[in-house]
Image (cartoon, rainbow, N blue to C red):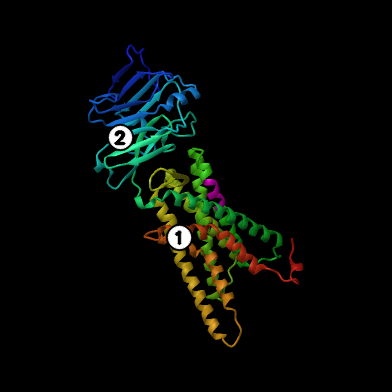
């Protein structure tokens, strides 16, 4: 957005229009020592002792002259613009703006970025406006690329909230506002926790993706002429986990490209791979039921083909329905710290109802069935242990069997139901560690049950 000014006869001038008010003053690289600008409902200008009821105050540091010289900015004029009409700054989310105003700071003839002495914008407001809400400082992102929509972006800005005052400290100059979000406060994380969880998850997912791929490769290279149903179900689960881990690892990096179409595509792929993982964990429990409970008359024609249709087809149908209802159900999602100063962007589901129904609700059904199946297996193992007291039976073997089934059935994902209360952070660490390494654990399980003896090696074909 550009402004046109007539030649300044004096050092400064103020123009009032119906949609915005503009204050402009002459400056220069040699004589700039920093400046304080302020504004209220009827006046915009430089800070002085007799100014009262200031709505916004902008402090420009002296470092601007150094950065202006480095970035070929003549620093000839300094402009503070107050926009009363915010229709020009509406994004696709219809974001609410504090005081229903946008504050723009323009310095010289080019933009200035990467300041170490922050530009400070202090906004006074009514405390009641903040009830049940949190807010953050953002800038209006504009780009000539048609694939990137204009939007509010918090990058480079830090938010400091007091009783009836919000201060924005930013390392660049552009259009600023305070963006409100109706998200619950308890969904945020401490900065150090967020950083450590991010690293743990990325490392775990990387390990899981590698070993999931190795498991599938081993199956393809050393498979028998006719593979059993158990192994084929395990391999499909590993394939789903591989897709989930790869999509997750590339998600955060690709979300930084700010391409809306690409972000939606990544979010769809991540959602689909997550649902496939849940579905194949449910199929593991179903096959366990067929083997242990319904032992007789269990032959089903095209059994694996039908399971594959369910395991890969149902998640696809769910995702297509979500897209058909509203393609904006997918997009950029931001995880923020408690102090609102740091965030991790990712491409994910933007509609809470879609998330709760397709992820939480869907997994709840599968988790209930898988947990019931795990309890049934444990009960049978205890019964067999009691019946074979006169024989030597390894308790450790039964224990490893149960732990292996916990990985296959995904019972550790049930930790998501305990993400509240005083153990919230501990639960998140356990959840991140156990579930990000699920592919690695299944690899160990696969190696244990498929380790051939010396006389069996010759029967394997490549």
Pointer 1 local density, CA inside 10 Å: few below 14, some 14–19, many at least 20: many
Q: Label for residue 363? A: 1
| Tag 1 secondary structure | helix
Read off the residue under disc 2: 123
- What is the number of callouts on the image? 2
Residue 96 point in image, percent of width and height: 32, 38
Q: Is residue 362 visible?
A: no
| Tag 2 secondary structure | strand
Residue farthest to the bottom, as pictured? 390
Residue 85 point in image, percent of width and height: 30, 29
Residue 99, image quadrant: top left
Q: CA distance from mark 1 to mark 2?
A: 44 Å
Q: Is residue 341 visible?
A: yes
Residue 150 point in image, percent of width and height: 43, 33
Q: Residue at x 49, y 65 (%)?
A: 411
Q: Residue at x 48, y 49 (%)?
A: 195
| Region of the chain picked out in magenta, as a range | 245-251
Residue 340, image quadrant: top left
Front-lying residue, 388 or 134 = 134
**SS assignment for the magenta stretch, majority:** helix
Q: Residue at x 26, y 37 (%)?
A: 125
Image quarter of the C terminus: bottom right
Image quarter of the N terminus: top left
Front-lying residue, 190 or 86 = 190
Does 55 sit above or below residue 368? above
Residue 432 point in image, percent of width and height: 49, 57
Q: Earlier in the sequence, mark 1 or mark 2?
A: 2
Magenta segment includes 450: no
Pointer 2 local density, CA inside 10 Å: few below 14, some 14–19, many at least 20: many
Which of label 1 and label 2 is nearer to you?
2
């Amino acid at each position: 957005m550009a402004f046109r000014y007539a030649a300044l006869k004096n050092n400064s001038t103020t123009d009032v229009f119906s949609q915005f008010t503009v204050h402009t003053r002459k400056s220069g690289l040699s004589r700039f020592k920093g400046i304080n600008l302020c504004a209220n409902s009827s006046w915009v200008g430089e800070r002085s002792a007799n100014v009262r009821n200031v709505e916004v105050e902008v402090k420009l540091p002296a470092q601007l002259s150094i950065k202006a010289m480095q970035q070929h900015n003549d620093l000839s004029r300094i402009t503070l613009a107050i926009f009363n009409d915010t229709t020009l700054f509406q994004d696709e989310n219809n974001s609410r703006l504090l005081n229903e105003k946008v504050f723009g700071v323009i310095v010289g003839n080019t933009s200035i970025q990467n300041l170490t002495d922050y530009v400070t914008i202090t906004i006074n407001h009514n405390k009641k406006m903040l009830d049940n809400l949190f807010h953050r400082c953002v800038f209006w992102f504009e780009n000539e690329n048609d694939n990137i929509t204009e939007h509010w972006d918090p990058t480079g800005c830090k938010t400091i909230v007091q009783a009836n005052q919000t201060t924005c400290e930013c390392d660049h100059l552009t259009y600023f506002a305070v963006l409100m979000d109706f998200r619950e406060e308890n969904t945020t994380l401490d900065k150090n926790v967020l950083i450590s969880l991010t690293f743990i998850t990325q490392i775990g997912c990387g390990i899981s993706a590698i070993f999931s791929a190795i498991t599938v490769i081993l199956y393809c290279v050393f498979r028998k002429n006719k593979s059993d149903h158990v192994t084929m179900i395990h391999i499909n689960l590993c394939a789903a986990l591989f897709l989930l881990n790869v999509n997750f690892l590339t998600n955060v990096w690709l979300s930084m490209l700010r391409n809306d179409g690409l972000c939606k595509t990544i979010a769809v792929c991540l959602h689909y791979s997550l649902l496939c993982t849940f579905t194949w964990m449910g199929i593991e429990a179903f096959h366990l039921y067929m083997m242990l409970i319904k032992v007789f008359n269990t032959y089903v024609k095209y059994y694996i083909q039908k399971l594959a249709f369910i395991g890969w087809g149902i998640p696809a149908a769910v995702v297509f329905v979500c897209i058909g209802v509203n393609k904006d159900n997918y997009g950029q999602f931001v995880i923020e710290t408690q102090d609102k100063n740091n965030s991790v962007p990712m491409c994910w589901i933007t509609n809470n109802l879609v998330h709760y129904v397709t992820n939480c609700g869907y997994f709840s059904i599968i988790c209930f069935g898988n947990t019931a199946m795990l309890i049934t297996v444990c009960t049978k193992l205890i019964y067999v242990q009691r019946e074979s007291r006169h024989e030597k039976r390894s308790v450790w073997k039964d224990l490893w069997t149960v732990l292996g089934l916990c990985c296959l059935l995904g019972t550790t994902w049930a930790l998501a139901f305990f993400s509240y209360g005083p153990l919230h952070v501990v639960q998140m660490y356990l959840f991140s560690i156990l579930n990000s390494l699920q592919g690695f654990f299944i690899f160990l399980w696969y190696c244990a049950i498929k380790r051939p003896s010396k006389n069996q090696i010759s029967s394997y074909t490549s």
